[in-house]
Amino acid sequence: MSVNQPPAGDAQEAELRVLRDQIDSVDRQIHQLLNDRARLAQQVAEVKERYRQGEETPVFYRPEREAQVLRAVMARNEGPLADATVGRLFREVMSVCLALEEPLKVVFLGPEGTFTQQAAQKHFGQAAECHALDSLEQVFTAVEQGEAHYAVVPIESEDAGLIRHTLDLFRRFNLHICGEVELTPEAASSQLNRCPRYLVVGRDAIGPSGEDKTSLLLICGDEPGALHDLLAPFHRRKISLTRLETRSSGQHDWKTLFYIDFEGHVSDDRVAELMVELNDLQVEVKHLGSYPKAVL
Ligand SMILES: O=C(O)C(=O)C[C@]1(C(=O)O)C=C[C@@H](O)C=C1
């Protein structure tokens, strides 16, 4: 090494110092902006409090708005961070902002460490308190009775028995689906054939986010052609189903239960007309919810 050149270590340190000073400066700005955002969320909470109806606690969690924020974040992303990465970061930012408004309590079927818990944390972020309960029945009851704000329940997995139970509980409880969560194959381990999917369940109906899904339960007898009659109104309106599950009952009070998912929100004219037509058929129709399509 020539005597006139500084040792490589010093040169590297000097270059790193310049970049790290810039990182410190950016961090200060991010930090300030995060707290600016958090203060705005607190003001949002005050507005929700001010317009509360009587004794009802205001609804702080707004999944349709969260979906819009995350979609906008991902659409404007120019990298080098991946769309999904910035989506996850903003997921956490909103999670802590919401926790300042009201810490969310979310329940799921235990034990701890299952895919369902991963799904709950993915959907609500790390600031939500997620609690494992011993049965799906307890999970639905906790939300219905207001002991928890939301539940995350499996709707597609390897375990068909679990799904049948979920559908049965949807029928019995008057709760609304307010979101869906998909776990990627990497998150769910590659041994599974299809990605597990979960639904978020709450007490309130959700407004449109612009890209929504609707889920229905249709319950009918075992007359031949029942499925054909049910599907005709969808077909006429060119509404394509994203999911159709059929369960035959082991019980006396219903014969066949169809769980149907399709794109659109119940406030869309097309879907509202569909609902009117379905209600004219000889079937029990239960609107389980219209909710934002999974973003992350
Ligand atoms: O827009 C709202 O209603 C908010 O409460 C703010 C906010 C956010 O941090 O952007 C937080 C929680 C809601 O679930 C949705 C969005």
Image (cartoon, grey):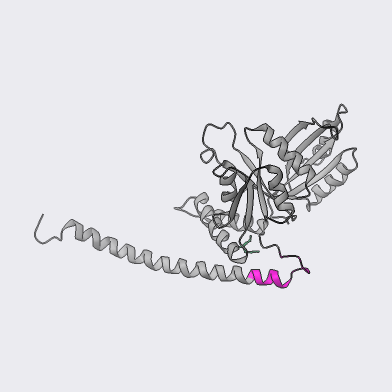
Q: Residue furthest top?
A: 224
Eyeballing the image, is 113 above or below 92? above
Eyeballing the image, is 231 above or below 122? above
Numbered range of the magenta stretch: 44-58
Residue at 74% over, 71% down: 51
Q: Nearer the viewer, residue 239 or 32?
A: 32
Residue at 57% over, 59% down: 95
Where does residue 182 sit, x and y in percent of width and height? Answer: 60, 43
Eyeballing the image, is 27 above or below 266? below
| Left or right position of 202 against 251 | left
Is residue 48 highlighted in magenta? yes
Q: Quadrant of residue 153?
A: top right
Regarding residue 177, the answer to whether it shows in the image is no
Regarding residue 200, the answer to whether it shows in the image is yes
Where does residue 194 sit, x and y in percent of width and height? Answer: 60, 34
Number of numbered discs: 0
Q: Quadrant of the N terminus?
A: bottom left
Q: Nearer the viewer, residue 284 or 88?
A: 284
Is residue 114 highlighted in magenta? no
Q: Residue furthest left?
A: 3
| Left or right position of 187 against 178 | left
Where does residue 202 sit, x and y in percent of width and height? Answer: 71, 53
Q: Nearer the viewer, residue 4 or 213?
A: 213
| Left or right position of 180 against 228 | left
Where does residue 78 sit, x and y in percent of width and height? Answer: 49, 55
Q: In terms of image quarters, where does ligand 1 lie?
A: bottom right
Q: Quadrant of residue 21?
A: bottom left
